Amino acid sequence: MLLCSPEGFPLPLALAAAPRPARLDGLRIGLLDNTKAPVDKMMDYLADRLRDRIPGVTIFRIAKKHPSMQAEREVIEAVAQNADVVINALGD
């Protein structure tokens, strides 16, 4: 008989948050929707407020296909190609 321990040993992450830009003027802002309600309405509101506050802002919106799964490779690639900063929203 083989006994296995369910205990895991987390590995330390060597990740750090990217530095925040000093200004959003001239940057492309990505809005990433996780497709849970009511994120779409929140993103509409946020896009409108960003347009009000930052004249000429470029907003790129995209949504994951499934809320409980990680973002698909094509979604991540599209965000990387079309946005300088990203706001990710989670709903429930």
Image (tube, grey):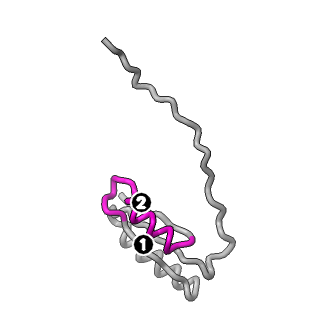
SS category of the residue bearing label 1: helix
Mark 2: amino acid: Leu
Pick the front one: 79 or 92: 79
Q: Secondary structure at mark 2?
A: loop
The 10 Å Cα crowd at callout 1, few under 14, some 14 to 19, many 20 or more, is some
> Quick check: is 88 in the magenta stretch?
no
In space, the residues marked 2 and 1 are separated at their CA atoms by 10 Å
The disc, 2 or 1, on the residue closer to the chain's N-terminal end is 1
User: In the picture, residue 70 is in which quadrant?
Assistant: bottom left
Q: Left or right of 62: which side holds 29?
A: right
Q: How many labels sit on residues? A: 2
Q: How far across and down, in percent of the image, does residue 34 sit? A: 38, 62
Report crowding for label 2: few under 14, some 14 to 19, many 20 or more residues within 10 A (C-alpha): some
- Place residue 5 in its image quadrant: top left
Q: Where the N terminus falls, by quadrant?
A: top left
* CB within 8 Å, label 2 to label 1: no
Residue at horizontal 35%, vertical 53%?
A: 69
**Magenta residues, start to end:** 64-84
| Residue depicted at x 60% and y 49% | 15
Say whether residue 82 is magenta. Answer: yes
Horizontal and vertical percent for residue 51? 52, 84
As drawn, the residue found furthest toward the bottom would be 56
Q: In this figure, which residue is indicated by the disc labeled 2?
A: 90
Find disc 1 in the rendering and name its residue. Answer: 43
> Compared to 82, does 15 lie above or below?
above
The percent coordinates of residue 52 (x first, y second) are: 53, 85
* Looking at the image, residue 91 lies above or below residue 27: above
Q: Position of residue 45 (x, y in %)?
A: 44, 76
Toward the top, the furthest residue is 1
